[in-house]
Amino acid sequence: MPTANPSSPRLPVVFIPHGGGPWPFVELGLPKAEVQALATYLGQVGQRLATPPKALLVISAHWEERVPTVMTSTAPPILYDYGGFPPEAYRITWPAPGHPGLAARVRELLSGAGFSTAEDSERGYDHGTFIPLKLTYPEADIPCVQLSLKQGLDPAEHLAMGRALAPLRDEGVFIIGSGMTFHNLRAFGDPRAQDISAKFDAWVQDAATSPSAERDAKLTQWTQAPYARLVHPREEHLLPLMVVAGAAGADRGTTAWSGSMMGARISGFQFG
């Protein structure tokens, strides 16, 4: 596992919207301008780093376990955790190697913060990882580890997870939260979603870009945001932002990208 190097800059942390299903690698009838805008942003995420990362740690909205759990395979398979798409959706590849050493370091840091942890040697990259990162790192040559969310989806716990993982930023690890600031599958495409999502997204942007103490307090109480439960009937797609915000420490966030998906407003953030 890489160790801290005083001559290397601290890496930022990011929260990225990962879109829906196997987009943009399969034609889904989504508005082309929306698809292109989000794909372009995701393709530029890695280019914003001052130095290339030694490894990636991804917290995906699509994995929950009783305790925070890491993937330990040296060659994780692809987990096609979606259904009802054309055959080509199940042939998408992203063969990034795993990193058991990083997985062990993640467990060490979380255990030091009082979390029980576990590992999974068989699980593969879900579409919250392999779809957006196929755009960000198409060569798939940087080792990657996925970390699960913790069942219960307590925002304060996930902020604490992120705080525990912050030292990885000085060890060459790029921490990526993969979710969506809008995730109500029944409301995508509904004309009302544009106004509802815009109000919630404005709140998220304000929270994410606030000074750290204010930011964390707001994110902990995210259900008080406008239309919170309409935008997130279940909050798993927002929780990766909590982990990233925790890892950000005192670094203030910026809105790295804001756009739309099927008419709903969504945003991505960078800290540091």
Image (cartoon, rainbow, N blue to C red):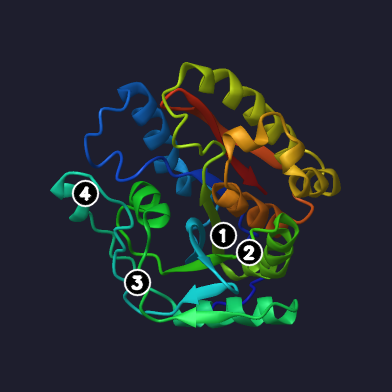
* Tags 3 and 4 touching, CB below 8 Å: no
Q: Looking at the picture, how far across and down is residue 64, in whole percent?
A: 52, 64
Can you see residue 54? no
For disc 4, the marked residue is 89
Where disc 1 sits, the SS reads strand
The mark that comes first in sequence, 1 or 2, is 2
For disc 1, the marked residue is 175
For disc 2, the marked residue is 169
Mark 1: few/some/many CA within 10 Å (<14, 14-19, 20+): many
Q: What's the residue at 27%, 50% (across, down)?
A: 83
Q: Nearer the viewer, mark 2 or mark 3?
A: 3
* Tags 1 and 2 touching, CB below 8 Å: yes
Mark linked to residue 97: 3
Mark 3: few/some/many CA within 10 Å (<14, 14-19, 20+): some
**Image: 195 above or below 124:** above
Q: What's the residue at 53%, 18% (across, down)?
A: 192
The residues tagged by marks 1 and 2 sit, at their Cα atoms, a distance apart of: 7 Å
Where disc 4 sits, the SS reads helix
Name the kind of residue labelled 2 in the image.
Answer: Arg
Q: What's the residue at 71%, 40% (across, down)?
A: 208
The residues tagged by marks 1 and 4 sit, at their Cα atoms, a distance apart of: 26 Å
Name the quadrant containing residue 108.
bottom right
The residues tagged by marks 3 and 4 sit, at their Cα atoms, a distance apart of: 21 Å
Q: Nearer the viewer, mark 1 or mark 2?
A: 1
